[in-house]
Image (tube, rainbow, N blue to C red):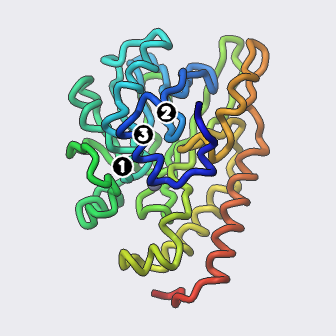
């Protein structure tokens, strides 16, 4: 049985997820038309059907890739049809499986130029904690003024620095057979674990990451999102909503969630800044 991710130390989740990945295995589920959750109980991954093949958002960790493939198979697709892998940010739980997926599928990999540079400069910030990791090639970067168009799917990207310098959020439409369209949004990396005094001091990271984060949030707050996808499902309590999925009801379709998430994290960073002992200009 899985305990709620909120009550577990992230390092414990990394250990469990990499050494006993079967304990975090969950069945895939539909989040929007032609859009599916294929991640595990700890970290998210999303599959988009397109007219040119499958698009995958994030890879999970290398020891967990078989779970992603199994989830894709359970949905009736072939993992070998993944043609494009879009990465949200350079932390191990999101990119750790990229090499294995690219080797198996030949998928092209996209990641922001900022996080490609950050990974090259600060490989310690990958946080793979000694677990298996294969270097991967990034074929393309995001350009926010140019959507990623793949077959009949279009993904708008928004650079959202703070959690990492190159964290990128994805926004896209999902249209059902009757022509109803829902706007989906995935914040690429919303964790505050990289913004605390202790973290910034220990790793020698700039305190201005916090103001970058707040600026990102201001840009993202005005966007309309019907269906909010968590880069970790716990961020928006996705897994507790899975039992509510019905043919005529999508429990993820709730436009208030996006604003709630952005406001909650904005408040938390403001509190962090207010109680900080570090010089905000450093
Ligand atoms: Zn992260």
**Residue denoted by label 3:** 17
| Side (left or right) of 49 relative to 224 | left
In the image, 209 versus 114, the foreground residue is: 209
Do residues under tags 2 and 1 come within 8 Å of each other at their CB atoms?
A: no
Q: Residue at x 36, y 49 (%)?
A: 92
Front of the two marks 1 and 3: 3
Q: Residue at x 77, y 36 (%)?
A: 254
Residue 90: x and y in percent read 36, 53
In the image, 221 versus 10, the foreground residue is: 10
Residues under labels 1 and 3: Cα distance? 12 Å
Specify the quadrant that holds the N terminus. top right
Mark number for residue 75?
Answer: none
**Residue denoted by label 2:** 24
Vertical order, 241 against 159 (above or below): above
Vertical order, 210 against 29 (above or below): below
**Residue denoted by label 1:** 92
Element class at badge 1: helix
State the residue lying farthest toward the top. Answer: 76
């Amino acid at each position: 049985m899985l305990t709620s991710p909120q009550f577990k130390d992230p390092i414990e989740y990394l250990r469990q997820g990499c050494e006993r990945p079967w304990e975090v295995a969950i069945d895939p589920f539909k989040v929007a038309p032609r859009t599916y959750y294929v991640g595990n109980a700890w970290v998210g991954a999303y599959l988009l059907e397109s007219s040119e093949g499958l698009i995958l958002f994030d890879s999970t960790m290398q020891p967990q890739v078989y779970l992603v493939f199994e989830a894709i198979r359970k949905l009736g697709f072939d993992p070998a049809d993944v043609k494009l892998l879009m990465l949200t940010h350079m932390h191990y739980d999101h990119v750790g499986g990229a090499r294995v997926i690219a080797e198996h599928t030949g998928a092209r990999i996209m990641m922001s130029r900022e996080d490609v540079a950050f990974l090259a400069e600060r490989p310690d910030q990958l946080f793979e904690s000694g677990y298996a990791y294969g270097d991967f090639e990034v074929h393309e970067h995001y350009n926010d003024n140019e959507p990623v168009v793949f077959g009949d799917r279009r993904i708008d990207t928004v650079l959202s620095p703070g959690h990492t310098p190159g964290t990128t959020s994805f926004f896209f439409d999902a249209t059902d057979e009757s022509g109803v369209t829902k706007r989906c949004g995935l914040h690429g990396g919303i964790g505050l674990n990289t913004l605390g005094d202790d973290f910034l001091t220990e790793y020698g990271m700039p305190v201005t990451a916090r103001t970058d984060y707040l600026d990102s949030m201001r840009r993202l707050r005005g966007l309309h999102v019907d269906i909010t996808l968590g880069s970790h499902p716990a961020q928006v309590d996705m897994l507790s909503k899975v039992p509510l999925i019905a043919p005529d009801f999508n429990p993820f379709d709730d436009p208030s969630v996006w604003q709630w998430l952005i406001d909650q994290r904005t408040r938390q960073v403001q509190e962090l800044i207010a109680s900080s002992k570090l010089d905000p200009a450093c």
